[in-house]
Image: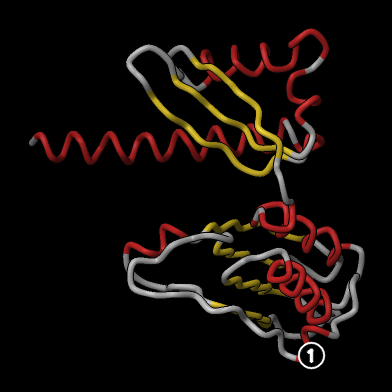
Amino acid sequence: MIFMVVERKFIDDAIVKIHISKYLEKSLSRAGFSRIDIQKTPLITRITVYVTNPGRVIGRGGSTIDALTETLRTKFNVENPQISVAEVRNPKLEPRLVAKYIANSLERGANARSLMHSTIRDIMLNGALGAEVIAAGKLAAKGARAKQIKVRLGYLPKAGDVTNLVDEAKVAAYPKYGAIGITVRIVQPGTVFPDRVIKEVELPKNIAAARQM
């Protein structure tokens, strides 16, 4: 019975985190929202928000962050929320920001394959140990079948506890031909795997020569 209660609490916490993340992503889109980290202590719930523009989160005189804190307390029943803001150091290593970039580019009519090649090249050149970019859906003109394009480089575990070391984000793009689901997975520089030493990855010629969109 105790195990079931603990398991239920973990599930509830995960669901609350998803709802908070979606709310903050919508509210802080202009601040370049990337992700959140939630840590509970006996006294407060510390929520760290990672964005590219911290000033937009804080607001004039702290007005924006105060309003967000009150919303988390009343709407999501977060006990004693305390929001701190962290600036994203490298947007090219943040899966959500990379996925949004791909989505926006596809909506503007960019070639999907060239875009994904240049994107994964930039990820790897910024030190990632592994990366995968997937686009699935209406990638061609009206009437064409839905298909999937997947580009993967470096080491990217697919099973076991080590998958927790892979950062992942999923977003959707809506070009005029139909919806496209985008998944980005990145193994951050310096990640240590217990059973493997990661070697430097040499970029394939087609990816190294991909034109920046």
Q: Quadrant of the N terminus?
A: top left
Q: Residue at x 69, y 80 (%)?
A: 146
Residue placed most toward the observer, 97 or 130: 130
Q: Residue pushed farthest bottom?
A: 205
In the displayed structure, 10 sits above or below 129; it is: above
Residue 26 position, x and y percent, is 71, 36
Residue bearing the label numbered 1: 206
Number of numbered discs visible in the structure rendering: 1
Q: Residue at x 32, y 15 (%)?
A: 42
Instruction: Kindly indicate the quadrant of the structure image that contains residue 116.
Output: bottom right
Instruction: Kindly indicate the quadrant of the structure image that contains residue 134.
Output: bottom right
Residue placed most toward the observer, 182 or 95: 95
Q: Residue at x 80, y 75 (%)?
A: 118
Residue 102 position, x and y percent, is 78, 63
Q: Residue pushed farthest top?
A: 61
On the rendered structure, is 43 left or right of 72?
left
Residue 124 position, x and y percent, is 68, 71
Residue placed most toward the observer, 201 or 60: 201
Residue 172 position, x and y percent, is 69, 59
> In the image, what residue type sits under mark 1?
Asn
Instruction: Kindly indicate the quadrant of the structure image that contains residue 3.
Output: top left
Q: Around disc 1, counting alpha carbons within 10 Å, would you say few (fewer than 14), some (14 to 19), or many (20 or more)?
A: few
In the displayed structure, 172 sits above or below 134; it is: above
On the rendered structure, is 57 left or right of 83?
right
Q: Quadrant of the C terminus?
A: bottom right
On the rendered structure, is 161 left or right of 52?
left
Disc 1 is placed on an element classified as helix
